[in-house]
Amino acid sequence: MYENDSNQYPNYYSPYSEDGNTSHTDAPVDPGNPIPPEPKKHKKKGGFFGKFVKMALSGVVFGLCAGSIMVIMLHLAPSESKEEKSEAISVTENANHVIANQDIVEDAESVGTANISGNTVVSDVSKVVENTMPSVVSITGMYKVEENNYFGFRNFITESESPGSGSGIIVGQNDTELLIATNNHVVEDATSLSVQFIDDTTADAVVKGTNADVDLAVIAISLENIPEETKSVIRVASLGDSDQLKVGEPAIAIGNALGYGQSVTTGVISAANREYTIEENTACLIQTDAAINPGNSGGALLNARGEVIGINSSKIGGSLIEGMGYAIPISTAKPIIAELMTKTTRIKVDEAQKAYLGIVGLSVTNEVQEAYGLPEGVYVTQVFAGTGAANAGLVKGDIIVEFDGEKVRTMEELTFLLECYEKGSTVEIKIMQGSPSGYQEKFITVTLGGRVDS
C-alpha cells in the first residue's frame, strides 16, 4: 500500500521492543525491512551492590514514612491527645482543689474527694456535715391558730393550737442557759417549744428575744435540763463571714425539713446580695439552689469549711418558687443575735395569771413612718377605761416604744412581753406623746391588771 522509501523516514525509531515493551533504541529502521533490529542491551552501572543499596535506602525511607504516619495518627487520635490529656489533668487538679482555689477552704480534704463526671464536679460533703450536725437542732412546738367561725350572721373568732416545726443553730451559752438562734416566725405565737439534739435527746425551750423586722429570734434551754451525755456531743456552731461569699461557691443546707428530722441538701450560692421585701421590710439575702423546705427555717446554710454563712428561711420566697432558697446573711444576723442573747429570758405565765395592759394598738410600719412621720413602735388606737393603761395616763395617739426596758417595734412584740408578766406587776413604759409636728419622750409607770379587770 505504501512504498518503502529509505529516505522517507530517515530518523524513525520503533517504539516497541520484541517483547512488546516500550523502549527507545539508537538503531535506525531499515525501510526495506519493517521489522526493526533487536536493540542493543546496555549494561547498567552499579551492579548487584547498587541494587542492594537502593533497596536498603527504599526500606529506610518506607520505615520512616510509616513511622511518621503512625506518630501523626497517634497524635490525632482523641484517646491519646496531648491537649486533651493536659486539659483532663487540669480539670482533675481543679476538682481536687476547687475549694482551695476559690479561697473557700484551706484544705480540700475537708470536703472529701472531688470526682469528675462529664463536666460536673461532685464533692463529698459528709465530713463537713458530720462536724456541723451537732450544732444544728430540730424545733417543734404548739402554736396559736385563729379560726373564723360563722354562726348565723355573726363571725366568731376562736383560738386553737396546732403543731409546727423548725430548726435552730447553737450559738452560745451563758452560766445557766444554752442559746439557740432561729427565725422569729418559728417561735412566733408558740405556746410551747421543744428542742431535739443530735443524739435525739429533747428539752423544753423558752424565747429569750425576738426581732420581727429581720425574722430572727434566740431561744434558751436551762443547762440543768440537758443531760451530761448530750452536752458532750453538742457544740457551738462556727460562724463565718457572709460578706466574702462568691457566686458559684458550694452551699450546704441543714435543717429539720418537713419535721422529719435533720436532713442535708447541697447546691451553690446563686446570689450573694439578693434584695427581697417581706412584710414591708426590705433586706439583702443569700440566694441558693440548695433545697430549703418548710421545717428548714432557722437551720444553717454552710460554706465548704462548715462555717455558718446564713440562717435559712422557707418563709421567704414561698412554696411556688422552685430551685430558689433564701437565707439571712450571718454577717447581718451576728450583731442582732448578740443583742438578743443578752435579753432577760421571758417565761410565759399561766393564762389565768397573765397580765393585761388595756389598749388596742397598731404596729407603725416603715410605710406609715415615711408617710406620717411617726416614730417606730406601737400606736395606741384605743384605751379601755379602768385598766392599768388608763390609770397611768395613756391616751389614743401615744406611741409605745419601750416596755420594761425592752424596745418595742410591733404589736406582736408587745403582746409577747405581756405574756411573761403576771397581773399586779409594775413596769415602766416609754412612750412618744404629741403629734407628727412634735413628739416628746415620756416615761410612765403602769400597774398591770388581769383580763377579768377590764
Image (cartoon, helix red, strand yellow):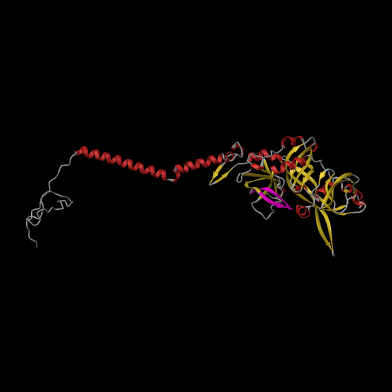
Compared across the picture, whether 17 is left or right of 295 comes to: left
| Image coords of residue 426 (percent x, y) | 90, 44
Compared across the picture, whether 94 is left or right of 307 comes to: left
Q: Residue at x 73, y 34 (%)?
A: 232
| Image coords of residue 430 (percent x, y) | 85, 46
Can the viewer see residue 201?
Answer: no
Image quadrant containing the N terminus: bottom left
Q: Residue at x 49, y 43 (%)?
A: 87
Image quadrant where residue 244 sits: top right
Compared across the picture, whether 286 is left or right of 228 comes to: left
The front one of 76 and 174 is 174
| Image coords of residue 371 (percent x, y) | 76, 55
Q: Return the residue found at the far front.
A: 437
Q: Return the residue found at the far bottom.
A: 153
Residue 276 colored magenta? yes
Residue 99 colored magenta? no
Residues in magenta? Answer: 274-288
The front one of 76 and 425 is 425
Can the viewer see residue 406?
Answer: yes
